[in-house]
Image (cartoon, rainbow, N blue to C red):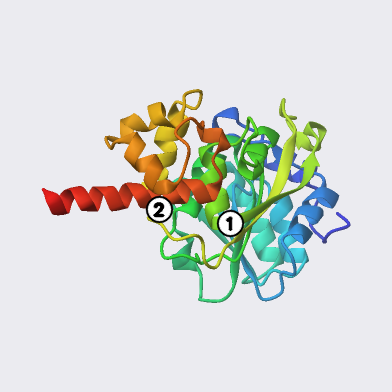
Amino acid sequence: MSALDALPPLREVIRRHGLSARKSLGQNFLLDLNLTGRIARAAGPLTGITVVEIGPGPGGLTRALLALGARRVVAIERDPRCIEALAEIAEHYPGRLTVVAGDALEFDPRAHLDGGPARIVANLPYNISTALLVRWLALEPWPPWYDRLVLMFQREVAERIVSPPGAKSFGRLSVLTQWRCEAKILFDVNPSAFVPPPKVTSSVVRLVPRASPLACERSVLEQVTGAAFGQRRKMLRQSLKSLGADPAALLARAGIAPTLRAEDVPVSGFVALANAFTALARRDQTSA
């Protein structure tokens, strides 16, 4: 019996259900219930909140979320071996845990929500963590259906998410994230906390959606940042040529020096570039 609830210790659950972590699924099980409790608490007060969890595995974080008062947890799990273990948690918390068997990259949680406050809290599988984040950042309309994200990433990815302009880790993910969210690294997690231990340190990141991000078309911002950081060692007057517009005109309209490199441009600068690109494209269509 654990100190968190009356359910068996996670190591016993793993042994009983034969849940050896699979590298192909990006699995690293978090067994320290003190740590899962800390992650759940980092998500803020959970009373009345529906939490969406990705890759619950044997359910350590799931148990913490429910024990700390989440009204309901919607857990998306791709590994069929984990479903039985999660069913035991669902039985312990009647009506409060919904387990969905499937691929998180193809799953839309909105069908399982009831219009109340919702947030995403997860120890993400490393192999799909960035893809999931980009998908959640691309939701329309904005603000999205969640009020915050509390997610675990590899430390390297976490640093890219929160990195300021001018830093080596500042890149496309930094811009797309910081444009729509306020992001902060809350704490690190040592590899020894996992089974099996990964080769890297992990970090828990909190992201809170901005109610009113700087105005621009998301798809254009993605296009502009893709071009700029696709050749990040080159000056913008060169890297932006792949957009098909005149880089000099584009940069002049955005008020950005053509000799800058992508990593030196703030988020507001990329928004200005996206809006300049949209304006030039419309002008060309009108004059055609």
Residue 112 in the image: above or below residue 191:
below
Left or right, 57 with respect to 247, comes to: right
The answer to whether any part of residue 113 appears in the image is yes
Quadrant in which the N terminus appears: bottom right
Instruction: Bin the neighbour count of mark 1 within 10 Å (Cα to Cα): few under 14, some 14-19, many 20 and up.
Output: many
State the residue position of label 1: 181
Q: N-terminal of the two: label 1 or label 2?
A: 1
- Which sits in the foreground, 50 or 148? 148
Q: CA distance from mark 1 to mark 2?
A: 13 Å
In the picture, the disc for residue 101 is: none
Residue shown at 73% from the left, 58% from the top: 63
Residue shown at 84% from the left, 59% from the top: 4
Secondary structure, mark 1, is strand
User: Which residue reaches farthest left?
Assistant: 288
Left or right, 68 with respect to 2, comes to: left
Q: At label 2, which amino acid type do we have?
A: Arg
Question: In terms of image quadrants, where is residue 159?
Answer: top right
| Total tally of numbered discs in the picture | 2
The answer to whether any part of residue 133 appears in the image is no
Secondary structure, mark 2, is helix
Q: At label 1, which amino acid type do we have?
A: Cys
- Which sits in the foreground, 194 or 244? 244
In the picture, the disc for residue 218 is: 2
Residue 200: horizontal and vertical position, in percent?
72, 28
Residue 122: horizontal and vertical position, in percent?
64, 51
Residue 184: horizontal and vertical position, in percent?
70, 51
Residue 102: horizontal and vertical position, in percent?
47, 49
